[in-house]
Image (tube, coloured by chain):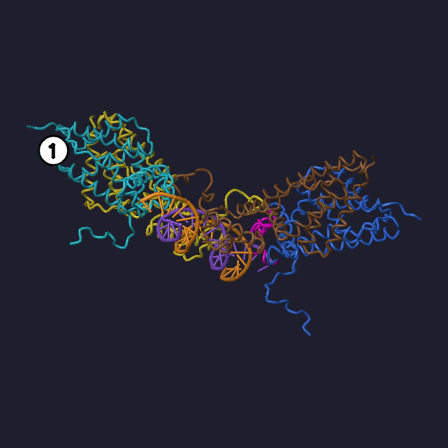
Chain colours: A cyan, B yellow, C brown, D blue, E orange, F purple
Amino acid sequence: MAAQAPAADGQKQPITPRSARGVRTRNALIAAAREVFERDGYLDARITDISKAAHVASGSFYTYFNSKEEIFRALVEQVQEEMLHPHLRERTGITDPRKLIDASNREYLRAYRKNARLMALFEQVAQVDEQFMALRIERGNAFARRNAKLIRTLQENGQADTSLDPLVTAHALSVMVSRMAYMVFVLGQRIPYERLVTTLNTIWENGLQLRDAQD
Amino acid sequence: MAAQAPAADGQKQPITPRSARGVRTRNALIAAAREVFERDGYLDARITDISKAAHVASGSFYTYFNSKEEIFRALVEQVQEEMLHPHLRERTGITDPRKLIDASNREYLRAYRKNARLMALFEQVAQVDEQFMALRIERGNAFARRNAKLIRTLQENGQADTSLDPLVTAHALSVMVSRMAYMVFVLGQRIPYERLVTTLNTIWENGLQLRDAQD
Amino acid sequence: MAAQAPAADGQKQPITPRSARGVRTRNALIAAAREVFERDGYLDARITDISKAAHVASGSFYTYFNSKEEIFRALVEQVQEEMLHPHLRERTGITDPRKLIDASNREYLRAYRKNARLMALFEQVAQVDEQFMALRIERGNAFARRNAKLIRTLQENGQADTSLDPLVTAHALSVMVSRMAYMVFVLGQRIPYERLVTTLNTIWENGLQLRDAQD
Amino acid sequence: MAAQAPAADGQKQPITPRSARGVRTRNALIAAAREVFERDGYLDARITDISKAAHVASGSFYTYFNSKEEIFRALVEQVQEEMLHPHLRERTGITDPRKLIDASNREYLRAYRKNARLMALFEQVAQVDEQFMALRIERGNAFARRNAKLIRTLQENGQADTSLDPLVTAHALSVMVSRMAYMVFVLGQRIPYERLVTTLNTIWENGLQLRDAQD
DNA sequence: TATGAATGAGCTTTCATTCAT
DNA sequence: TATGAATGAAAGCTCATTCAT
């Protein structure tokens, strides 16, 4: 009958801010975290520095977060809201596979380039934090499943190589794109943007042996 | 604290063992490092633990290495000797592109699977140590350049899609394979081995639009 | 170990206390440092012991200082404020050279005796820390220059041996006094105080061949 | 009846070399110690470095010495033999006080300058090693007693100021000379050599109010 | 809520000294 | 005697986390 259980499960007290000031402080901390993480890397970022960057006393950090992991997760959530779009097909109505592939790749690469420092950070954290790694894996799987469905449809329509395993293929083509994005935008491999897009598009299309519908 | 400069004759002391016993100890340390790194991860590995695993006193570590980085590098060098093979084509005499692709992918995936924990470790360290990352990039570039040359030849012989940029394509197909290896053997994505090989082979072949020589 | 450079914004963290409590702690550390330095000597003093003597945790030391050198320098500064007096002549109005010499020597020896342990410490640190040695040299030079001026005036008035180089003489007579102070008050050479003063006075006077103004 | 007691008093076994090789090694170590001490300072000198400089295995050090102190003492002894001269008066037959003072000061300053690095070292070690400090004190006292005797004689002959305490005066004039030598030859105070000698001579003579014998 | 100082576990690193060969 | 590696006690220093105000 208790409307609100008293949160307490042995942990401390990370608050959900009640006052406007609290909200501001919490947001300042998240913004500062992003700044410090991107500048120093996740591992070298000290909680102290985050507080300092947020112009907040070092102890105040613990009013809202229990650890570096926790604020990182908060940061990820916030960023995700910004980066999350409804699915391309639904959004744009594109049905031509070639156009869909092109649009997807372009959208992905553009977003990656724009948030390159953040993506580098995610890559780093995945190597360090198992939970975050698990999150990425799950996200990758979901994405691959979606693409697998598309491939399967194309195969059924006689538009794609039926010898390919849809799910494995979806994984392979996805990691190819994301890894190239990493190589170019994070590691700085010098490949002109348009050539990158075109090449990836072509490998997708060739790889699937995409052809126009038989109808 | 020191009135005078610290004797400075370059670096510290790490020696190359002169006695048989020294060689044994150094090797024991490297073996222990591998064990500890694979078990605890690079970041959580403590020098103390490496010494302990090698059954030597903590200070003995510093007889041969100055830091975790340094012993890691020594480990990499040692492993590389084991893993380094002459190039496949030269070694096997295979010239048929399909067979070459198949043989390459099989060899790579087999080696990756066999050393999966080590590869996971490398992935982690690359995120943490700039020098090591640079090393991998350079190695990746060299590998891609070799493959690009092969692709260019195929294009010239009319055996491959000439609209593809050879170097970018080489990079893309390489990262696809290596990243899938990571996904399967390190992250544990459940994909049957043979299906993995076949799918990757097919994407390579399709991707390049490989066809038999014209003549 | 760090992939990125360590945040680098110059030095480390040593802060100037903002709160009253902070001031107290910092002072407690300096007082403890003096205690430990005088007891164990500069070299054998461990930072741990200073913290212990100040009744703070070992890490608290680093809130205010980065090293033993640094706290030593803070100690010196604090002591200097206590020991610094305006110049004797200005202060007392004494003009008779004999009286001035007597007053100077007495004042110096009294202060030295009072702070003997500290002076011993300074002597030790000068042998160990180049910066501190440099400081003392400069101070000695300034003192000698002042005395040299006095000597030059006396020579011009026909009250002192004109064959003497004023600056070298000033140095020589100064080190004589300070070194005798060290010998007696630090090393424990048993010379009655009054005899010490009288002898040094006489050597000064004789040494300069001091005589009454000719007028 | 035991002709040779077995040395053992709980300490280890520092040997007096029996073989020619042993003598050579021991001497090489002492020479190397001097080199390293002068280069790095006493405190920063590591036993390891001394062995290295002597081209001897690190463990061999302990065949001849138990510690840094011990080899330092051996070094001092060896150096002393080189630097020890019979007393000036006996040696030269000089009796004129002025000439004697001049000869003494010149000899002292020349030797100091020649061995400046070593003298700097002694100064440093005295601040660190009580036994060595005691040694220097005793040596200084002996020297002062000798000079005091000379002063007393001069006073009795009416050639020196009888108001001076001979022993304190001897100390004071001695430390003046030795400290000026330190200042010039170790600390690098720029005073021309001849001016230094002359000034010190004059202060001695004036200080004692030296005059020709009355007879 | 905010502040900023205090805490102390945890790891690194050095080197004098020992010891098996 | 000589060798050169092994040992391990001692400090140093960092920073996440706590806490009194």
Would you say C26 lies left or right of C120 here? left
Q: Residue at x 23, y 47 (%)?
A: B188
Assign a secondary structure to mark 1: helix
In the rendered image, residue D169, in percent from the top left (x then y), is placed at 78, 50
Could you say which is closer to the camera, residue A135 or residue F15? F15
Q: Residue C44's quadrant in the figure? A: bottom right
In front here: C157 or D172? C157
Q: Mark 1: which amino acid? A: Leu
Q: Residues within 10 Å of mark 1 (few under 14, many from 20)?
A: many
Q: Tell whether A66 sits left or right of C163.
A: left
Residue found at the very far left of the displayed protein: A215
Q: In the image, residue D76 lies at what x, y percent? A: 68, 53
Residue B154 is drawn in which quadrant? top left
Residue at position x 6%, y 28% in the image: A215
Relative horizontal placement of residue B115, taking residue D121 as reference (left or right):
left
Q: How many marks?
A: 1
Please report, as a chain letter, where disc 1 is located. Answer: A
| Quarter the N terminus of chain A occupies | bottom left
Q: Position of residue D179 (x, y in %)?
A: 71, 46
The residue lying toward the viewer, choosing from B5 and B65, is B5
What residue would you read off at disc 1?
A154
Residue numbers of the magenta segment: D40-64
